[in-house]
Amino acid sequence: MWPHAKISVMGGEQAAGVLVSVKEEQLKAQGKTLADADREALRTSILNKYEEEGSAYYSTARLWDDGIIDPADTRRIIAMGIATSMNRKWADTKNGVFRM
């Protein structure tokens, strides 16, 4: 990853919106409501968590990826990966392209 990359399934704003809605629905099912101050506190805590845990340094420190590279080294790293992949004969497959 590059130093300023973010690793998240969704952005903090989207996550905060979804999780606040879920909390409101849980409380609604119990006949309660979420106070504006509590809603804002929950939203802020989620945004802060996503900001911290979405960092490339956070994920690399937990070995969730292969590390942080200097953007100036990008071509060298990609070339090394391509060269490594060419050292093996790959079997022909009948499946399509997988996208993530």
Image (cartoon, rainbow, N blue to C red):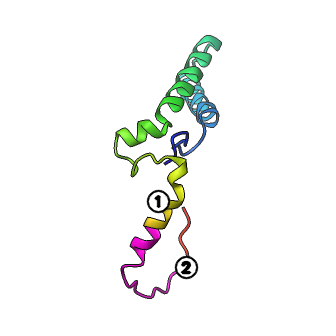
Which quadrant would residue 100 be assigned to in this image? bottom right
Q: Residue at x 40, y 48 (%)?
A: 67
Q: Position of residue 14 (x, y in %)?
A: 63, 37
Give the extent of the magenta segment.
Answer: 81-95
Secondary structure predominantly adopted by residues drawn in magenta: loop
**83 part of magenta stretch:** yes
Q: Determine contact: label 2, label 1, CB under 8 Å.
A: no
Residue in the foreground of this view, choosing between 64 and 28? 64
Q: How many marks?
A: 2
| Residue matched to label 1 | 77
Q: Position of residue 15 (x, y in %)?
A: 58, 35
Q: Is residue 60 visible?
A: yes
**Which one is closest to the eye, mark 2 or mark 1?**
1
* 62 left or right of 31 in image: left
Q: Amino acid at mark 1?
A: Ile
Mark 1: give few (<14), some (14-19) or many (20+) Cα within 10 Å: some
Which quadrant would residue 32 be assigned to in this image? top right
* 50 left or right of 40 in image: left
Q: Residue at x 54, y 48 (%)?
A: 71
Residue in the foreground of this view, choosing between 92 and 2? 2
SS type, badge 2: loop
Which quadrant would residue 87 be assigned to in this image? bottom left
| Residue matched to label 2 | 96
Residue in the foreground of this view, choosing between 39 and 56? 56
Q: CA distance from mark 2 to mark 1?
A: 27 Å
Q: Residue at x 44, y 45 (%)?
A: 68
Q: Is residue 33 visible?
A: no
Q: Position of residue 17 (x, y in %)?
A: 63, 32
